Amino acid sequence: MGNAASDGSTSAASIFDAAQTSALDKIVSEQSYMMSDSVWVTFFTLDQPLLDMPPATLQQFFRPYAHNFARNTVRSGNFRMLIRHVTRSVRYLSPPRHHADTIVTTTTTVLATESFHVINVLCVVRHFIKHFIEHNCEVVTLFATEGNSTSSSTDNDIAVDFLDALLLLLFDAPTEDTYDLHLEGINLLLVLASSTAYPSTSMSLHPTLLDVFMTHASAPDERGGGRPSQRADDLVKRLLLSYLDQLPAPRMESAAAIAATAALPPSTTSSWDNVVEFFSEIQVFPLADRSALLLLVLVTASNGGGNPFRKALATLADRDELSMVAHSLPFSHVVAVLGRNIHIELHATLLYHALLLNPSFRDALCRPVLPLLEAIYMHTLSPPRLYTLLAVLLHLSENPLVVQTLHQSQDHQTWYQERYLCDLSAASVGVLVLCRVLKANLSVLHDSLVQSMAMALLWNVMQFAKNLHPTATQSLVKLLAHAAKKEQLLRPSPDEAAAYLATARDLLLCIQLGCTPRLLPANAQLVFDVLNGLAMHPSEALRDDIAMVLGTVAYCRAMVDQGDDEGDGDDDGRMHDLTMEQVLERIQGGCKALAHSDDDVLEDIDFDDLDDHLEQFQQDDFIKEALAKGVDLRQYAQQIDRELREVEMESITQYVAKSADIVDLYNQVQSCDDILARMQEMLLGFQADLGGISDEIRNLQNESIGMNVKLRNRREAEEKLRLFLDQVYIPPTLIEGIDDGDVNDAYISYLMILHSKLAYAKLSQAAPTSLGIVPATAKAVQQVDGDLEKLKLRACAQ
């Protein structure tokens, strides 16, 4: 009969009962069976739960049947009959609104009216078609084969009807009852579309099932009056909705079986080279993952007539912005789901193609950036995964609004293992991760694609650099210093040194972006770290590249040194005497000054008189003569350029001829410079000595002025004291004259003096000579008052 055992192969133990096994043997044999034959009824009543069986058992059981079926159906045409019955059953289960005439009301025979029967038959068909594709069978030809017919018909009407039935089944949202049916339909479409993974070795011009699928999806809808078909739009939208819903399987054991039934032998690589390999992974949400995978297969497939699924994804609108558009989805929901799963390669690849085909996604995709950076951090040493993640992030960074948003957000990151990251922007995290990738690529990967994408990302981020975290700026400067140092060490090996030199130059360009006048006021921290960490005397290969950065750094360094009045004259000492906050404050002032000076230069440019200058230029006699003669300005410019080169070469020749004299002159200049330096040192010493003498003279002058003031004050005090003492002092001559003198004219003068002193001692108010003191209360007067009274009594006794 030509069944599985007839070719001598050993079949696995049957998973069907005897009647169903016999029916399967007949179907795969060379014998043709009409649509009404009972063998189809028996086969379409499979009650075994195929989706719950181990995948290895199913593969081993169906392999010999599929092999014989591929060989015998060319004669029997039974595969075409099988597909027609499956199409009728699937249409019967699809919602009535998707077709004009409900099958229930017709006389068409439907063999499977229960969903679990249809699921089992679809599972069997999937195994058959997968075997056909793997062994390079012309599957479309098998769909069109009429059995023993002498014509070689290649009409694909059966294939089109079958695909159309599967699409109509999938257009509605899955429920718990239809979950397995939807999942098996997507699995079957994946296998049908996987023909590109097994290119035929023959030169057959027959189209593949994927080609038929593409053509059918873009064909006009006959029931819609010839209007453009919406199949591609509806399928893309349905697949994305199934992906966004993230519905778990009603039975977890069934989900594991579904993920395993379509598995090929394990791949030797971590990436999937064909669409069926993905089924070897057990997923928690199989319907969402298979939907995303089918969408990727469809949008990446090439077709000479255009890819309708790619166009459908490209024209998908954001429902958050355009709520009235039918072909739309909420991009914010897409962002949320992708952000949670971006570390998985399938989701990252889906995001990449969404960005590539639909630029509108970039405006809504700011949230997945941090998960993307985390995934890049985790897969730094895995180039295949790294390619996709870097490409996705590169597409996102092409939108200036996205990059500007990254510089504004603040967050904590716990996944970065090198250090705890607190209160830093997503852009700062990006700089950290990208510097880590670049360093790993220089040391381990040596991948030019990783290098170019990571550096392009860093360039895009630094174009809007603003208030980067110190950890990020330090990482950037340290990587630059590392690359410059390695370039110098590896100069004996030019090939190895070239990579480090190119990296150092690119990093300098990124730093220069942050030092432009537009961004400089917001990047004082970057200038501070460059000032502290960048070698001020780089290698000769980097001198031209670092000129702009060094100019900015030198200006800010001068601003720091200028404000430090307590320094000891040493540049390093000045900066170290300040706190970091003070240094940052002064660097901030320097950055603002540079930015304002650049704005002033731009404001000073006046284009109002440009027309007048052009008119004056045109009136020049030489210009007028050249224009009148029709001189070719290009040739004239080339001639001038040649003459300049000739003059330059002549000048170089003369310079070389006079090189000995120039060297001698240089030596003389050096000697003069040394002499002048010594003279300067002597003059500085003499100036210092003169400064010391001047200080001493100034001190003497100050002391002289002080002594003069003291002398004048003492003389004034002495005069006043003398007058006071003359009134209270009793001279010895007065005492002797009154005690022992004769009473005569001299005695009378003594009495008058005594009387004057007694009267002065009795005064009750200050006198002009009493220094502002009442004489009667003065201590000196009280001391001599007794002596005056004694002299008075003595005079009376005389």
Image (cartoon, rainbow, N blue to C red):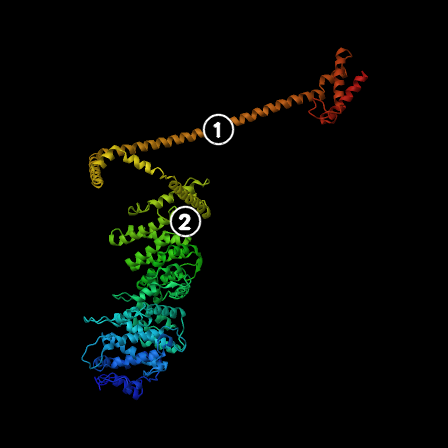
**Kind of residue at disc 2:** Asn
* Mark 2 neighbour density, 10 Å: few (under 14) some (14–19) many (20 or more): many
Depth order, front residue of 272/629? 629
Depth order, front residue of 163/465? 163
Q: Residue furthest top?
A: 745
Q: Quadrant of the C terminus?
A: top right
**Kind of residue at disc 1:** Glu
Depth order, front residue of 433/104? 104
Residue 76 place in picture, x, y as percent: 22, 82
Residue 234 visible in the current orientation: yes
Q: Is residue 202 left or right of residue 426?
A: left
| Residue at the spot of label 1 | 696
* Mark 1 neighbour density, 10 Å: few (under 14) some (14–19) many (20 or more): few
Alpha carbon separation for disc pair 2 and 1: 52 Å
- In this rendering, the answer to whether 641 lies above or below 732 is below
Residue 712 place in picture, x, y as percent: 60, 23
| Sequence-first tag of 2 and 1 | 2
| Residue at the spot of label 2 | 523
> Residue visible at 30% across and 66% down?
308
Q: Residue furthest front?
A: 225
Picture quarter containing residue 237? bottom left
Mark 2 falls on what kind of element? loop
Mark 1 falls on what kind of element? helix
- In this rendering, the answer to whether 632 lies above or below 452 is above
Q: Residue furthest bottom?
A: 18
- In this rendering, the answer to whether 284 lies above or below 742 is below
Residue 533 place in picture, x, y as percent: 37, 49
Picture quarter containing residue 207? bottom left
Label pair 2/1, CB-CB below 8 angstroms: no
Residue 304 place in picture, x, y as percent: 25, 65
